[in-house]
Image (spheres, helix red, strand yellow):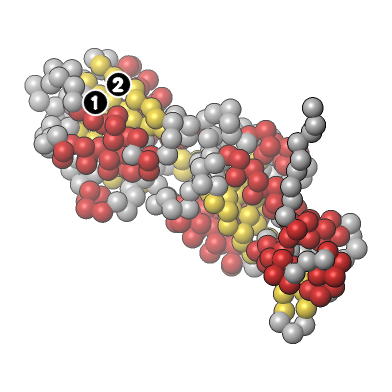
Amino acid sequence: MQGAVVITSKYGIIERYLLEELKSGKYSAGDKLPTEKELMTKFNASRETVRKALDRLTLKAVIVRRPGLGTFVSYGNDNHLVGILVQQITSYIFPYVVLGAEDCLFRNEYKMLLGNASEDPVKERQILGEWMEAGVKGLIIDPVYSATKRSNKDFVKTLAKSGVKITLVHTDWNIDQVSCVVLDDACGGEKAAEIFYDHGHRRVAVIYKSTHLPGVVRARSFSERCRQLGVDRIYDKAFNVSEFTGAPMQIAHELMSLPLQIRPTAIFCYNDATALQLQLVAKRLALRIPEDISIIGFDDGPIGDFRDVLTTFAHPKEEVGKKAVEILLDMLNGGKPQKVVLEPELIERSSITQAKS
């Protein structure tokens, strides 16, 4: 049986060649690289192909292209380059986290690379690998599939052992040499349970993403606290795809279509995007919030008019980004790894009421 044939694009070959040249020590920061014409001749490639390779290296901040002058090496062992890799850049959380991080990096004269894993661990690993080739020494990562074996936890361990400084956000994997900035997710889940109980709710539910460690922690602590309080019925409902696929809507429909005598009277949603979908289903079923169903969310996200109603826990989004950068820069300057736990603040609005007797 013949081995698999690996097909590599010509621009990829040129990119790899230049990266190897840089890693070999042949060039120093500020040195001029071969011209486009020289690379075209060497690789028998078109100008468009060479420029694509150079554009990719520019995006990685490996080189600087100066019109009329040429292409120059932009990094050395002392580069001020930090990579921030988020789960999904279109989420309402991550732009604010990045904003807080970028401001702190700018004030400390560091440059930022931004990566979007698109909730795909394969893409996440690929981006991290490319950044390592580009000489990035510091990483801020919000890992995808953080509660599963599909995560890149082992790869992060390997990077940390190799000397790369890493700060995780929203996830604590308890890895030596790796810092983290997390919320007290367990506290949020416990408080949600206590609020429902104090309002007389004895049939409750929690909806969460099973692949997301913060969501799992929030749901687990909610259910455990409900059991401790003596809640009669607890519906534990998980989904394992992005909440933006509409998966929570199906769960919400199943729960709110149950017979009245067993239907939950209160639901804790692991984030506000899930809570919003629950609200939409309630409208379709002619159920009122909070008269027929009480809801607590998490994040205090900008989700339209429902934000004015939803009782939720505020996510200190920009503070997470800022703290992550502060810790990472301290590590890059010889400091030790740190763990920072931020308290989610309860924002009380009008999506909870006393359960009907």
On the rendered structure, is 321 left or right of 299? right
- Residue type (three-letter) at the residue carrying disc 1: Leu
Assess disc 1: are there few (<14), some (14-19) or many (≥20) residues with their C-alpha within 10 Å of its C-alpha: some
Residue hosting label 1: 255
* Circle 2 or circle 1, nearest the eye: 1
Question: Quadrant location of the C terminus?
Answer: top left
Q: Which residue is found at the position 64% from the left and 43% from the top?
A: 125
Q: Residue furthest front?
A: 1
Q: Secondary structure at mark 2?
A: strand
User: Which numbered dot is residue 235?
Assistant: 2
Question: Residue 305 at x, y = what percent?
Answer: 21, 53
Q: Secondary structure at mark 1?
A: helix
Report if residue 196 is visible in the image: no
On the rendered structure, is 108 left or right of 297? right
Callout 2 touching callout 1 (CB < 8 Å): yes
Q: Name the image quarter holding residue 151.
A: top right
